[in-house]
Image: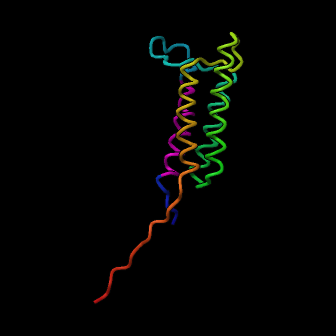
């Protein structure tokens, strides 16, 4: 039986949040479009989100770290692109902020110590 740890569940949820953010690529959201995401940013959200989901489902800390570092690099590139007046990724600073949050969460999940819960057998009289 597979036991899903809390940290693994967190990595899965963070990955699913990234994948769900692709809904903001739809232009018809009008005032509910909280961030702009398109072009390469969609690939970033889907690819790194899938990596985070895989990290959670497989319980692999290294994958969570890789996804977290990927989101941190994407956020840094978006900041540089915005500062230089270019649009390499097709996103905005709201997407950058979202990616920073995902990066921090996944880096915490990847570096947190794993403790195994001990099952104690009931004492027999």
Picture coordinates of residue 47 (x, y %)?
66, 36
Q: Residue at x 65, y 14 (%)?
A: 82
In the picture provided, is 38 more to the left or to the right than 124? right
Residue situated in front as seen by the camera: 107 or 120: 107
Marker count (numbered): 0
Q: Please, what is the dominant secondary structure of the magenta stretch?
A: helix
Picture coordinates of residue 45 (x, y %)?
62, 31
Q: Is residue 12 magenta?
A: yes
From which residue to which does the magenta span run?
A: 7-23
**Is 108 located above or below residue 30 in the figure?**
below
**Is 117 located above or below residue 37 in the figure?**
below
Res 121 quadrant in image = bottom left
In the rendered image, the residue lying farthest to the bottom is 125
Q: Residue at x 60, y 43 (%)?
A: 52
Res 89 quadrant in image = top right
Please, which colouring scheme is shown?
A: rainbow
**Is 44 located above or below residue 25 in the figure?**
below
In the rendered image, the residue lying farthest to the left is 125
In the picture provided, is 116 more to the left or to the right than 39? left
Residue situated in front as seen by the camera: 28 or 3: 3
Q: Is residue 47 magenta?
A: no
Residue situated in front as seen by the camera: 50 or 111: 111
Q: Residue at x 33, y 80 (%)?
A: 122
Q: Residue at x 57, y 17 (%)?
A: 36
**Is 20 located above or below residue 9 in the figure?**
above
Q: Look at the image and tell me in which quarter the C terminus lies.
A: bottom left
Picture coordinates of residue 84 (x, y %)?
70, 12
């Amino acid at each position: 039986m597979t036991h899903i740890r809390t940290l693994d569940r967190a990595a899965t949820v963070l990955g699913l949040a990234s994948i769900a953010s692709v809904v903001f690529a739809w232009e018809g959201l009008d005032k509910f479009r909280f961030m702009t995401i398109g072009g390469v940013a969609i690939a970033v959200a889907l690819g790194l989100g899938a990596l985070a989901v895989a990290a959670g489902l497989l319980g692999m800390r290294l994958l969570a770290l890789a996804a977290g570092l990927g989101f941190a690099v994407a956020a840094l590139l978006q900041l540089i692109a915005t500062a230089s007046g270019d649009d390499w990724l097709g996103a905005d600073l709201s997407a950058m902020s979202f990616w920073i949050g995902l990066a921090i969460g996944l880096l915490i999940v990847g570096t947190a110590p794993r403790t195994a819960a001990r099952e104690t057998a009931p004492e027999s009289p």
